Image (cartoon, grey):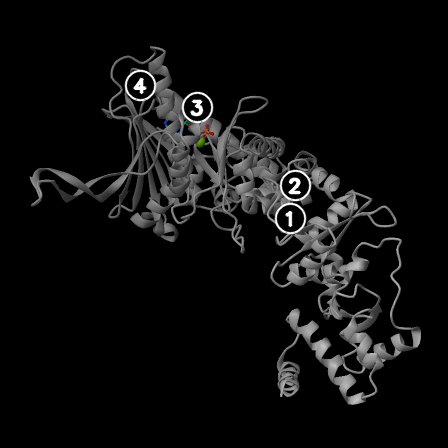
């Protein structure tokens, strides 16, 4: 029998072909997932006794016929009667398409992308790659088989057909344009991408593997390894996230991580097994990976599934930005399947899912920090970037994390923020009642500054993470009486300003003179010369770098964006502080030999620069020559 599809619009297929999915390749996911659905339905009916007897092999077959230029998806599911084909394929599916077209009229392309998600046009996506699609099907119910065919116009034909096996075969006559989909490698790639965890076994082609021979032995008497050709099964029908967490071991999670990301050779740090059934359904496993110096968020991304059917691994906008550092899978029947990403982002379920996941992740971190505190500290270096990123970008996450975030000092001890404030406030409070947190970014380079601080009874944190400058800024904004100062941002007496004044050994005139002398020795654009009466045994000359200026520069280098962009070209600037109480300076000022004075001051200045790695090229050469001469 021939029929005409009841569609007012002349030809809907060109429109579907053009707009339905940005990626044509998802047709395969749609057709295979229909086969999976039909098989699952059959299993359900069998379990409640509606279908009697042995169900047989339910494996879904995907086949290519190169000569006929056809791609076949064959299932042994519930099949369809003639009435059902008319109803589910011709009427409902087409009316979905029709409705789609109605809405589509007069809309812009972006609106259309938004609309697409609302329509279940799964089956018809096959027309994106086919000139003609045929259905051969036989229902589990009594009755004959059916053959339906349609060539992408509004006309279709449907007739009885002698089919012995229960189930459905979809035959797609692939267009010349899409002939890639007749290549084995291409179909294999797509099946692996979209069908890797579908719940019914999918068979495609053959593959070679090595097995123990049942008969042959090697010279040691062990079974000989022989190469065998076997049917290739594409998927793991029982992925780990569907299993009960209490029955799983740590090793299982690590193994599954490797199954997800075969090219990642690091073990993950922790995992979270998600299992939610209210207010929406969601399962999944998230992993905290080891964080590399150069984080590449485009690799090994979180994968979204809908009932074990792959949806996407472009989760930007679906999960908060900082979550993109995590790995793993999220599976929810509430994630719309037929979607473009912009649609996904605006979907309310997706938003709820996203905030729920953040909450779960925070809970897990709280739990680890409580119950496995040593492990938590052990892995802190890797967790830190993630937690800081989250705290910087999500207020709720900040609130949950602020009590478990830990600071590490230069002695390797850990403190929560509150603990640390209590620890340092007796000594590190300045005259304005600000608590001054001192930190180093490099314990080698800043060694002498750290030592000087320790001698004064101060504690020094190690803040060497890539987000630390931003993080410090945020903490200062949130805590009024807290200031952070890098250990080399000022001389030790001024890092934490107390009410005391230290008398200077030099009078005002002498001080001015030594300052001027120094100014003649350095490049004024880079160095500002200052004088300060410090301890006798503090360094005679010290290089410091203003905290504010340095942070601006750090952040502009990090690509802080926004206003920091303005400081992109910021030059380095330093203070050169002369200790007017140091004997070397005092003696120098008393000396009458001008040449000797210049030589000593140059030497002291160069030593200060050298200790900070600031003496280079010609200046370094001059210093070496002068030093040699002095020794002579
Ligand atoms: P959806 O899967 O969202 O219902 P589709 O357009 O993919 O939408 O499929 C339309 C309908 O056609 C299905 O609901 C189902 O009733 C029927 N159908 C499609 N493929 C099969 C199949 N392989 N076996 C049995 N029924 C099928
Ligand atoms: Mg479908």
Residue behind label 1 places its C-beta within 8 angstroms of ligand 2: no
Mark before the other along the chain sequence, 4 or 2: 4
Which sits in the foreground, 133 or 388? 388
For label 3, the SS is helix
Q: Mark 2 — residue?
A: 415
State the image coordinates of residue 141 (x, y, percent, origin top left): 32, 16
| Label 1 or label 2, whichever comes before in sequence order | 1
Query: Which residue in the structure is indicated by mark 1?
Result: 409
Location of the N terminus by quadrant is top left
Specify whether residue 309 is in view.
Answer: yes
Q: Residue at x 31, y 48 (%)?
A: 182
Around disc 4, counting alpha carbons within 10 Å, would you say few (fewer than 14), some (14 to 19), or many (20 or more)? some
- Residue 2 visible in the picture: no
Q: Nearer the viewer, residue 1 or 534?
A: 534
Q: Quadrant of the image for the C terminus?
A: bottom right
Could you tell me how far apart the alpha carbons at marks 4 and 3 are, in whole angstroms? Answer: 38 Å
The CA distance from mark 1 to mark 2 is 8 Å
**Rounded to the nearest whole Å, what is the CA distance between mark 3 and mark 1?**
38 Å
The residue labelled by disc 4 is 140
Determine which of the numbered discs, if any, sits on residue 246 in the image: 3
Circle nearer the N terminus (4, 3): 4
Marks 4 and 1: which is nearer the front?
1
Question: Which mark is first along the chain, 1 or 4?
Answer: 4
């Amino acid at each position: 029998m021939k029929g005409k599809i009841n569609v007012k619009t002349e030809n809907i297929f060109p429109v579907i072909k053009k707009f339905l999915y940005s990626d044509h390749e998802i047709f395969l996911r749609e057709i295979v997932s229909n086969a999976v659905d039909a098989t699952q339905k059959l299993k359900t009916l069998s379990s409640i006794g509606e279908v009697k007897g042995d169900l047989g092999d339910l494996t879904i077959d995907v086949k290519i016929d190169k000569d006929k230029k056809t791609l076949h998806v064959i299932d042994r599911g519930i099949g369809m009667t003639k009435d059902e084909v008319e109803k589910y394929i011709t009427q409902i599916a087409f009316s979905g398409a029709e409705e789609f077209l109605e809405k589509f009229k007069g809309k812009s392309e972006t609106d259309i992308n938004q609309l697409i998600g609302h329509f279940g046009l799964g089956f018809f996506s096959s027309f994106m790659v086919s000139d003609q699609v045929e259905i051969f099907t036989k229902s589990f119910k009594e009755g004959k088989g059916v053959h339906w065919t349609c060539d992408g116009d509004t006309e279709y034909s449907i007739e009885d057909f002698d089919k012995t096996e229960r189930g459905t075969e979809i035959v797609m006559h692939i267009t010349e344009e899409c002939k890639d989909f007749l290549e084995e490698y291409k179909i294999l790639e797509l099946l692996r991408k979209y069908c890797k965890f579908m719940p019914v076994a999918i068979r495609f082609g053959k593959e070679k593997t090595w097995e123990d021979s049942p008969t042959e032995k090697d010279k040691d008497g062990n079974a000989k390894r022989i190469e065998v050709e076997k049917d290739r099964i594409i998927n793991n029908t029982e992925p780990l996230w569907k299993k009960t967490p209490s029955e799983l071991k740590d090793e299982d999670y690590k193994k599954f991580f490797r199954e997800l990301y075969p090219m990642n050779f690091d073990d993950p740090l922790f995992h979270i097994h998600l299992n939610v059934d209210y207010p929406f359904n969601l399962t999944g496993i998230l992993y905290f990976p080891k964080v590399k110096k150069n984080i590449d968020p485009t690799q090994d991304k979180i994968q979204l599934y809908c009932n074990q059917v792959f949806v996407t691994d472009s989760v930007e906008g679906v999960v908060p930005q900082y979550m993109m550092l995590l790995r793993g899978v999220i599976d929810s029947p509430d994630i719309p399947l037929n979607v473009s990403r912009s649609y996904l982002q605006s979907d309310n379920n997706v938003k709820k899912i996203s905030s729920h996941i953040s909450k779960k992740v925070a809970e897990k971190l709280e739990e680890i920090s409580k119950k496995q505190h040593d492990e938590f500290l052990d892995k802190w270096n890797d967790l830190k970037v993630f937690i800081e990123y989250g705290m910087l970008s999500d207020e709720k996450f900040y609130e949950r994390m602020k009590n478990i975030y830990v600071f590490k000092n230069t002695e390797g001890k850990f403190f929560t923020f509150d603990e640390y404030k209590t620890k340092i406030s007796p000594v590190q409070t300045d005259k304005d009642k600000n608590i001054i947190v001192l930190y180093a970014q490099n314990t080698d380079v800043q060694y002498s500054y750290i030592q000087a601080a320790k001698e004064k009874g101060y504690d020094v944190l190690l803040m060497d993470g890539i987000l630390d400058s931003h993080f410090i800024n945020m903490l200062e904004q949130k805590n009024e009486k807290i200031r952070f100062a890098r250990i080399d941002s000022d001389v030790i007496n001024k890092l934490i300003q107390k009410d005391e004044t230290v008398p200077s050994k030099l009078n005002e005139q002498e001080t001015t003179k030594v300052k001027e002398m120094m100014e003649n020795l350095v490049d004024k654009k880079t160095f500002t010369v200052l004088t300060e009466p410090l301890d006798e045994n503090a360094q005679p000359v010290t290089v410091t770098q203003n905290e504010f200026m340095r942070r601006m520069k750090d952040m502009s280098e990090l690509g802080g964006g926004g206003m920091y962009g303005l400081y992109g070209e910021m030059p380095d600037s330093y203070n050169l502080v002369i200790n007017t109480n140091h004997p070397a300076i005092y003696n120098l000022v008393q000396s009458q030999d001008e040449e000797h004075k210049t030589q000593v001051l140059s030497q002291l200045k160069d030593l200060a620069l050298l200790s900070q790695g600031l003496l280079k090229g010609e200046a370094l050469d001059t210093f070496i020559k002068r030093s040699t001469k002095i020794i002579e």
